[in-house]
Amino acid sequence: MSKFLTRSIPRWRDPLILVMLWLGATIFDRLWLQLDHSVPAWDQGDHLSRALDYWRAFWQPNLFSGEWWASLWRLSPSYRAPLVYLATVPFLTFWGTGVDVAIAVNLLFTAILLVATYGLGRLLFESAGRATGLWAAGFSLWMPFLIQLRLDYLLDYGLVAMVTLTFWGLTAWRWSLLHKRSTGWSWLWAGLTGGGLGLTILTKPTAILFFAVPLAWMLIEISKAKSWGRWGQFLCLGLVALWTAGFWFQANWLTILTSTDRSNRNWQPEGVIPGDVGSNWSYYLRQLPDLVTGPVLWLSLGSFLLWLGYTLWRGNIRINPQPWQSGAWLLIFLLGTYVLFSIPQNKDPRHIVPIVPILLVLLSRGFTVWSRAWAGILPTLAAALTLAWALGNWFPIPLLSQWSGRHLPSPGPAYPLAEVTQTIAQAQPYLRSTLAVIPNTATVNPMNLNYYGQVEDFRVFAREVGFQPEGVAKDLDDFPWFIIKTGVQGVDHNFAPGKAALAQRIPTSPNLRLAQAWNLADGSELKLYQQQSPQIEVAPQASQSPQIRLQEVKVPTAVNPQQAIPVTYQVCGPWDALEQGVLILTWQNALRTSKALQHQAWVHDHGIGLGNLDRGRSLSQSAARENFCVLERLVMPLPTGLAPGPYGLTAAYVNRVSQESYPLATTAQMTLDDKIPLSPTTTPDLLSQFRQLIPALRSGQLDPVFNNLNRMNQADPTQDYYQQLATAAQFRLQTDPDNLEQLYTLLLTQVLQRQAPAATQTAQRITQLDPKNPYAWAYLAVVYLYQWHGGQAQAALDQVARLNPNLTELKTLNIVAAIMQLNLVQAWSLLSNS
């Protein structure tokens, strides 16, 4: 009878049901989003900004360029992998850059989730497979945590879909081996599973933990089978996964590992007591009611136990091993995942939520064990209660919303974050600006303000400031815009004294003015401040010139050499030449009467407008040739030991795209006189601050180098000043190839931009010119290790050991080099002796 019913079911029935389920979820989602006027919170804002970065990368794709692909992979340098962002690009391209448009990518992942959950259930449970798969797929749409993720822009919902899809493929491959299906099908499933595993890693690299235990189990089964063909299929799976995710991982492996480790160390979830084993291992079990609704969980367990008791009571139990093997396979996945994710300190229901569809397949089987006509009553009841709970939780439906109603849409009014970034973009239409953000609440934070700023043609960025109290003065000078908020400041305000100091100093600073203020729905006020005299100003020019001109240079007539010097440059010329231009500026002793005085000089190289010129992407060729004048109000620090006397400026222009260069006429001059009283100045520009770090880099003092870089990178979120410094250093090295200061500057910019081959050449040149410096060899070793060149790194480390065997980092680098050379005995020996 069951065979007859199975044959009589049209083939299109199940696909039609899945389509109807998808349409129902789509209507639910889009209706809720239409009613909701909330703004993205922290992670959501960061993910949206990253998606826009990928969207911009595809404005001018160059699919046959290795450098273009490398730059694409470098857009996701942490454990936040790129697959969801890449999947969002078509939605942003065709339907705009709104939050709801980005969330629409979850419609794609919902379709994948439905098909994969249905396919897994149908594959595992033979005659009851169709019903099991359909119930599991339907339940997956209405689980509370999955709905919450589906209505948000996070990586986790895409991860749920990809883990389910990959586990379906892995199960199909295993089933083809166990049931000795066609060898061709086994190879196909192995390859597809490898591709799915690679895509899952490209969603979130920690997802490999979901498959660690199932893959280990399959290795045991393959070993018992003693089949070279199965070993070949397993190798095929691994190679396809490596090829799929390997290019991204190779480009970012170091930052992926460090960011993952930092994330694990910096988070302690609520409900976990440090040192308490019970609270640690029971954490995810206590989250189960938020992952799976009570009606599905308890009715399924009750149905299965009732069936088991009834079958035993009838005494005619016939053990069919296949369903029990299927259940055991699902339990291997579920229990293995639970154990592996319970070990790290960093715990969150989002981390383990991909187990939910697999758990639902198992629970759905608890409903379909019955073959009676009334067997559909219990799952129908569970589905009805779950759907009612979902409707009441997410929509203001009378009676239902009183019962739950935890996730009702926010009716507004919307927070004026878009107005903030629009105000900045309109005030400076020719510049890329960075907004310093003091508050850090769910509604006003650096991440969501950065997203709204990037919507403004990527001309406004937002960054959090105030991490270090000693950096408050520099923050006030480095940023052109500031935003503060009255009332609640955010989760970490009390832990960052620098934030409190900035919030107090911004309204009273004589260098800042209030640009605009907004009243917020919570009764607080949002205030936007701007520099009174902006560091960079741009204005159109009536006269036309084909080349750049250094129109004016203003410096004090005489100044004390013990202080930094305020200087104003006015540079005019065609827009495209200004935007791509770097000024090569040398202030040199004008007397030069002795050999010693010839070296009395300092440089003030920088990109025109400090690299912040930006008119957006819709710029015609004629507009690119229009002339503008850029006014730069900068401060340049002086090196120690300068002799008093007159100093004159020598200037040149370099185009960092075409490499065109030519001298610039100037008669600017000043006198250094140590008898003149010191006068207060502001903080030097970022490039000058960077150059001040080079002596510390050369002597191996990396902590102050990277502490300062972390703060400076907040002021230039695109890190364009790295490229400006590199262009200037390369230009100077053409005429002075042995200049170690310029070589170290170039090396640091190349390392920070992860330009490993170029950094290798620069580091090799430094070791030739500075061979007795152990840190020069250590930097060369690090560059080799980044490229997985363990043998070459070891040779450089041997040189470090000869010069300074007590170098703190030497043992760690030797361990990494040994592992890369597969010299595990040496690595273990070094590790055990550390």
Image: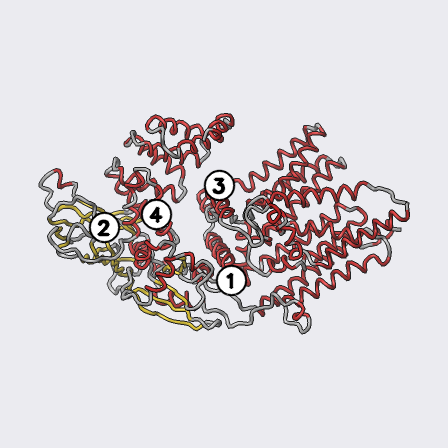
Q: Position of residue 30 (x, y in %)?
A: 61, 65
| Label 4 – label 2 distance at C-alpha | 21 Å
Residue plotted at (62% across, 33% down): 235
In the rendered structure, which disc, 4 or 2, sits on the residue that comes first in sequence?
A: 2
Amino acid, disc 3: Trp
Rendered image quadrant of residue 216: top right
| Label 3 – label 1 distance at C-alpha | 29 Å
Q: Position of residue 741 (x, y in %)?
A: 27, 40
Is residue 261 positioned above or below 525 on the image?
above
Label 4 secondary element: helix
Q: Which part of the image, by quadrant, shows the C terminus?
A: top left
In the rendered structure, which disc, 3 or 4, sits on the residue that comes first in sequence?
A: 3
Do the residues bearing badges 4 and 1 touch, measured as CB atoms within 8 Å? Answer: no
Amino acid, disc 1: Pro
| Label 1 – label 2 distance at C-alpha | 41 Å
In the rendered structure, which disc, 3 or 1, sits on the residue that comes first in sequence?
A: 1
To which residue does mark 3 refer? Answer: 253
Label 1 secondary element: loop
Do the residues bearing badges 1 and 2 touch, measured as CB atoms within 8 Å? Answer: no
For label 3, count other residues whose C-alpha is less than 10 Å away and answer few (under 14), some (14-19) or many (20+): some
Label 3 secondary element: helix
Between 226 and 827, the one lying in front of the other is 827
Residue plotted at (25% across, 35% down): 738
In the rendered structure, which disc, 1 or 2, sits on the residue that comes first in sequence?
A: 1
Residue plotted at (22% across, 57% down): 681
**Tag of residue 637:** 2
To which residue does mark 4 refer? Answer: 723
Rendered image quadrant of residue 558: bottom left
Residue plotted at (83% across, 51% down): 307
